[in-house]
Amino acid sequence: MALDIRVFPCLQDNYAFLVRDQATGQVATIDTPDADMIANAISGLSWGRLDYIFNTHWHPDHTNGNQALKNRFGCEIFGPQEVSRNAPLDQVIHPGDEIALGETRFEIMDLRGHTAGQIGYVNRDFKVAFVGDCLFVLGCGRLREGSAADMWASLTRLMTLPEDTLIYSAHEYALDNLRFAESLDIHDDLAVQASHLRTLRAQGLPTVPSRLGDEIRANPFLKLPLMEPDFDAQANRFGDLRARKDQFR
């Protein structure tokens, strides 16, 4: 059976993701940036239910809708322990765990760096990864709680997935990240992706999901550190790039 995935822009630049296991009809939302939008989307799709909330990390723009959606649908909330800092959480999950949405199973991946406990939801059969604020189109998350080494380790874990894995990032930052990547003026692989991204945004379309292989070839936060000989040097180069991006205007 297949997995239905719908992408919805909300708030200023967030994305919400609704995921439905076709075999059983069970539905989950990945994070809860806007409870009303998610509830309306479920109604518009005629899916009629929300069985689970799968949180990636605790930040309010990912968890603020937990209580309202639980009140409305009676759904069960899964996520890392840190979610309880801001919102209700029914079941704590950890990297290495597996959870089920009907007949679809998701592997829980350690994606710490943006926060100390961020996780991702990976299904290798359908080649999808919901990565929260770890990896973005041509970018990566800020180091809010973790170190450069933490984030680089998370990114390298993502890069072990097949290159045709679809990366579902939680924000629309593509054009800002593209400006930074072009300012580095260091590689040619960006040109094709740049044209594609600008076309999508000109049409009001999301740049999410992106393909992991495209990110490996064009995203400076992946491509440039990989030019270094070992993990420590890679993490240091990644940290330097992240600091430059933090100051980029």
Image (cartoon, helix red, strand yellow):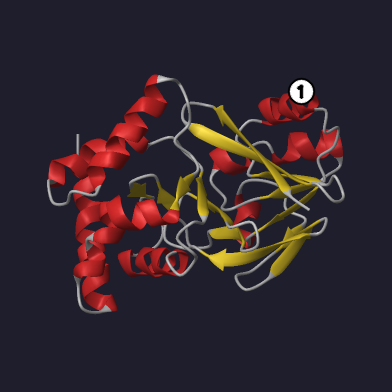
Residue 143 seen in the figure: no
Residue 171 location, x and y as percent?
46, 38
Tell me the kind of residue under disc 1: Gly
Decide if residue 173 is on the left or right side of residue 185. Answer: right
In the displayed structure, 5 sits above or below 94; it is above
In the displayed structure, 121 sits above or below 173; it is below
Decide if residue 189 is on the left or right side of residue 36. Answer: left
In the displayed structure, 187 sits above or below 43; it is below
Decide if residue 55 is on the left or right side of residue 135. Answer: right
Quadrant for the C terminus in the image: top left
**Which residue is farthest bottom?**
230
Residue 245 location, x and y as percent?
23, 46
Q: Residue at x 83, y 55 (%)?
A: 102
Q: Residue at x 58, y 42 (%)?
A: 62
Residue 225 seen in the figure: yes
Residue located beneath label 1 in the image: 44
The quarter of the displayed image where residue 137 is located = top left
